[in-house]
Each structure stands twice: as C-alpha cells, then as structure tokens.
C-alpha cells in the first residue's frame, strides 16, 4: 500500500461530464481530493487508464508491490466507458459485491474495480452512480423504507424497501431546463444568474394542478417578457417551477404516502424540498458527496449486499 499521505485506497465517482477522485486512508477518511477531472464523454476507453494514472501518480509507490485498490462508480462502467459493468436488475440491493467487475490494467501497481449500475425492464429505465449513493444512504439508515429523490440533469425517484431498490423512474427535468434556457426561443427571456424562489413556487403550484398545459405555460414565459417586461430572474425561476411541477405531478405514485429523502446539491435539493412542502410533504436532505463516499467505503471494506 502507498504510504504517501497515508492513502490506502482511492474512491472515484466518474460521471459523464465530471470526475471526482478521493484519496482515502485505511479508516476511510479523505486525505486528498481531485474534483476537476474529465468526465466519461471526454475520453475513449483506451484513455481512461493513462488519464487516471497521470492524476494519481504521486499517490502511488514507485515500485510494484501489492496492487493499489481503486473503487469506481458512475459512467466509467457504461458501454462507452472504461469497461462495461453489466446492470443489475431490480428488485435488487443497490450494490452486490459479487457483481462488481475488475478491470485488467496495463499498470500492475493498481487494481481497479467498477460498481455496476441498475436497470429496470418495465418501464424501461437505467441508473449509474446513483446506486452507490443509495448504498451510502443505506449504510447509515439500513431500515429505511420509502423513496429517495436524486435531483439533477436526469432526476430519479427510487422506491426502496427491505434493503432493495424496488423500482425507479427517471425524469429529464434538468436537461430540459438547460436545453430550453440555452437553445430555445426562451433563452434571452431567462438569461439571468439570479433566482426568485417566490416565482418558482408560484409556477410550481400553477402547473402541478394542470400539467397538460406545460407547453402552453412555457410559451407564456416568452410572452411575459415581450408584453410585460417581467425580469429575467423571475422568468428563469418560472421555467424551473413549471418543469419541477410537471415532474412531481408525474412522480406522484412514488412520493404519495412515503418517507422522502433528497440526495443532491444544496440549491437544487432545497428547491425540491420547498416544492414538496407546498404539497404538504416533508423531506430530509442528504449531501451527495457524503453518501457517495459512504457507498464507495462500503465496497472497499466489504459486505456482499450493500
């Protein structure tokens, strides 16, 4: 094992656009961090190993010895990633130690393992990376029975029971927001760095009661800009509120009557929590980084079903 900085293993969350790398000590504490690396979409399969080695070279021993353990979750295990890690099918535990794949590397100083994603046949759906966050939440809350919401580019609602992922559904809310705000007729109307929570919640309540009118409400954003000169900050917030409102209307069979946990970045998680409160629901928020690290720790320290 490496003695440099007391790092004993490396934990990695390798997403489509981003890469986060943590050097961990033998107790599972973070010793060093790299959080600005290239995501899966920027690399060919043959480029993953040399790119990673360049990042972590100073964490490793110069001489060959016992291979240095590296645990990876996320898109590195996708079909176009480093090596495909076949999906587990629901219902299943978020991580099964026996199904983790091992990557044959040119450099003998490292031992790379990739956590598989999860698939659902009906309705068809997939996840990669979120299963590790769910395992991390389970590691601290083993008896949880309810729903986890993971807001982001592709927001997921996941039903959990008896330590397993029972079912899940993905909503492209974040990606639709980016597309409309950057590439549609609305882009100039919503061009603001600021956010108005009141406008968000008003739009959320408006569309939640009539989600079939989403397309019409979206064009009203443009009309409000042209006819009433409503501030871009308010219109951007309305766009977000309309999209989240339509999502929560579609996800009702997941959250209705359930305990709800939100795992995501602070700002977006707070918006989802506020929206759920408008529906008379309470939700707790968990930090993405911490639950991801907890899931990767569980892989390293063992346990068959996590």
Image: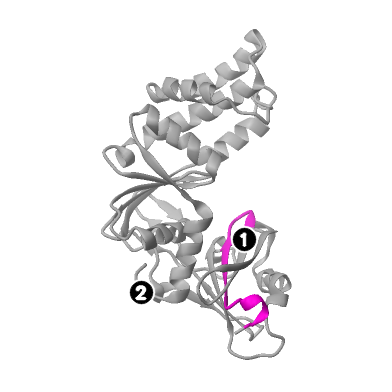
- Element on which disc 2 rests: loop
Residue at x-position 63% and y-position 82%: 2
Q: Nearer the viewer, residue 292 or 122?
A: 292
Query: Residue 72 appears at what percent x and percent y?
Result: 54, 68
How many other residues sit within 10 Å of disc 1, few (<14), some (14-19) or many (≥20)? some
Query: Residue 130 appears at what percent x and percent y?
Result: 46, 56
- Element on which disc 1 rests: strand
User: Is 171 above or below relative to 159?
Assistant: above
User: Is 134 above or below relative to 218?
Assistant: below
Query: Residue 116 appears at what percent x and percent y?
Result: 46, 66
Colouring mode (rainbow / by chain / secondary structure / one colour) = one colour
Q: Quadrant of residue 275?
A: top left
Q: Are marks 1 and 2 in contact (CB under 8 Å)?
A: no
User: Is 60 above or below relative to 295?
Assistant: below
Query: Residue 176 appears at what percent x and percent y?
Result: 56, 36
In the rendered view of the protein, which quadrant contains the N terminus?
bottom right
Q: Quadrant of residue 163?
A: bottom left
- Residue that label 2 marks: 304
- Residue that label 1 marks: 20
The part of the chain drawn in magenta is: 2-18
In the rendered view of the protein, which quadrant contains the C terminus?
bottom left
Residue at x-position 62% and y-position 77%: 6
Residue at x-position 43% and y-position 36%: 273
Could you tell which of marks 1 and 2 lies nearer the N-terminus? 1
Whether 3 is among the magenta residues is: yes
Q: Quadrant of residue 218?
A: top right
């Amino acid at each position: 094992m490496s003695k440099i900085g007391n790092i004993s293993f490396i934990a990695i969350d390798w997403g489509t656009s981003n890469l986060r790398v943590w050097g961990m000590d033998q107790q599972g504490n973070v010793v060093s961090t790299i959080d600005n690396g290239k995501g899966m979409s920027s690399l060919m399969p043959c480029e993953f190993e040399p790119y990673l080695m360049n990042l972590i070279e100073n964490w490793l021993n110069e001489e060959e010895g016992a291979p240095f353990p590296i645990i990876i979750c996320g898109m590195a295990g996708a079909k176009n990633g480093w090596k495909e890690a076949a999906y587990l099918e629901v219902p299943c535990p978020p991580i099964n130690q026996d199904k983790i794949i091992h990557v044959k590397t040119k450099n003998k100083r490292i031992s790379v393992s990739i956590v598989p994603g999860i698939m659902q046949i009906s309705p068809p759906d997939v996840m990669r990376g979120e299963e590790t966050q769910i395992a991390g939440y389970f590691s601290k809350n083993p008896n949880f029975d309810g729903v986890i919401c993971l807001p982001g580019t592709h927001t997921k609602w996941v039903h959990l029971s008896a330590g397993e992922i029972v079912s899940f559904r993905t909503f492209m809310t974040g990606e639709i927001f980016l597309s409309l705000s950057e590439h549609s007729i609305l882009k100039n109307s919503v061009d603001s760095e600021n956010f108005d929570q009141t406008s968000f919640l008003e739009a959320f309540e408006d569309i939640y009661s009539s989600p079939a009118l989403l397309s019409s409400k979206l064009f009203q954003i443009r009309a409000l800009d042209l006819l009433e000169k409503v501030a871009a900050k308010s219109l951007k917030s309305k766009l977000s509120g309309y999209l989240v409102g339509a999502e929560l209307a579609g996800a009702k069979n997941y959250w209705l009557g359930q305990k709800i946990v939100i795992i995501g970045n602070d700002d977006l998680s707070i918006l989802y929590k506020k929206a759920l409160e408008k529906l008379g629901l309470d939700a707790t928020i968990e930090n993405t980084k911490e639950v991801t690290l907890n899931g990767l720790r569980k892989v390293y320290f063992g346990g068959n079903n996590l």
